[in-house]
Image: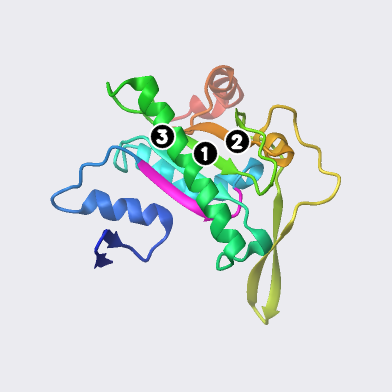
Amino acid sequence: MTKHELGLAVTATPASTIMVAVGMQPRPVVDLVVSGTNHGANVGYVTPVSGTVGAALIAASGLGLGVPAIAVSTDLPGRDPASDASAVQLRRAARVAVRLIAALEAATKGKGPLLPPGVVLNANVPLTERHLGVRICRQGDSGTIGITYQEKQPGRFVPQIRHAPEGQTHTPGSDTAAFRSGYTTIVPLRADYTAEGEILGAMRERLSSALSEP
């Protein structure tokens, strides 16, 4: 961790940066955590393995700061974060994040937190010249990328990021479908991963024999 003019820079995984803030004395007063902008979309099945989303979830949880959080991600031209075109796209994503925060502030009128307790927003800004707007979506069961591991040296495997398989079906109303169409997608997520509703009852019934044993 090093100190700079604007604050502190932490070399760590995204979630670990939140834990650094939790352990600081005096503990900082934080109204909102913005995680990102990540270089690459985090929609659909990629969401659970995203470090960017993970930092936001930790920030909103009891283990973290217990504050509202937004994860922001976007694809970049040629996946080159140093290019001028990528700088334009990152500024576009930053403007989207600012508009989201402004909308939350207007809706809450400065009374209480910007989001309900334990809730975070997963925002993804598409790489397109014709941005169609913003949609609130469900997390999809498809994605825009795939990850495989190749053995580059004996016993040493390296992740390879590739485009999602051709012919993938995107569920209507999902973040992946909307993102592919040119919309910025917003998926509300909970820091509490518990499967609600009928799932709890179904699991109690299915595991009844195990639950009856001491």
Residue displayed at 62% across by 53% down: 75
For the residues carrying marks 1 and 3, which lies nearer the camera in this image?
3
Q: Secondary structure at mark 2?
A: strand
Residue type pointed to by label 1: Asn
- Asked if residue 191 shows in the view, the reply is no
What residue is disc 1 on? 122
Residue type pointed to by label 3: Ile
Q: Do the residues under discs 1 and 3 have CB atoms within 8 angstroms?
A: no
Residue displayed at 59% across by 47% down: 42
Give, as a single range, the part of the protein colored magenta: 33-41
For marks 1 and 3, the one nearer the N-term is 3
Residue type pointed to by label 2: Thr
Q: Identify whether 199 is placed above or below 120.
A: above
Which x, y percent locates residue 198?
58, 17
Residue displayed at 36% across by 56% down: 16
Residue displayed at 75% across by 31% down: 171
Q: Quadrant of the C terminus?
A: top left
Which x, y percent locates residue 158?
64, 71
Q: Secondary structure at mark 3?
A: helix
What residue is disc 3 on? 101
For the residues carrying marks 1 and 2, which lies nearer the camera in this image?
2
For marks 1 and 2, the one nearer the N-term is 1
Within 10 Å of disc 3 (Cα), the crowding (few <14, some 14-19, many 20+) is: some
Which x, y percent locates residue 172?
74, 28
Which x, y percent locates residue 101?
41, 34
Q: Quadrant of the N terminus?
A: bottom left
For the residues carrying marks 3 and 2, which lies nearer the camera in this image?
3
What residue is disc 2 on? 185
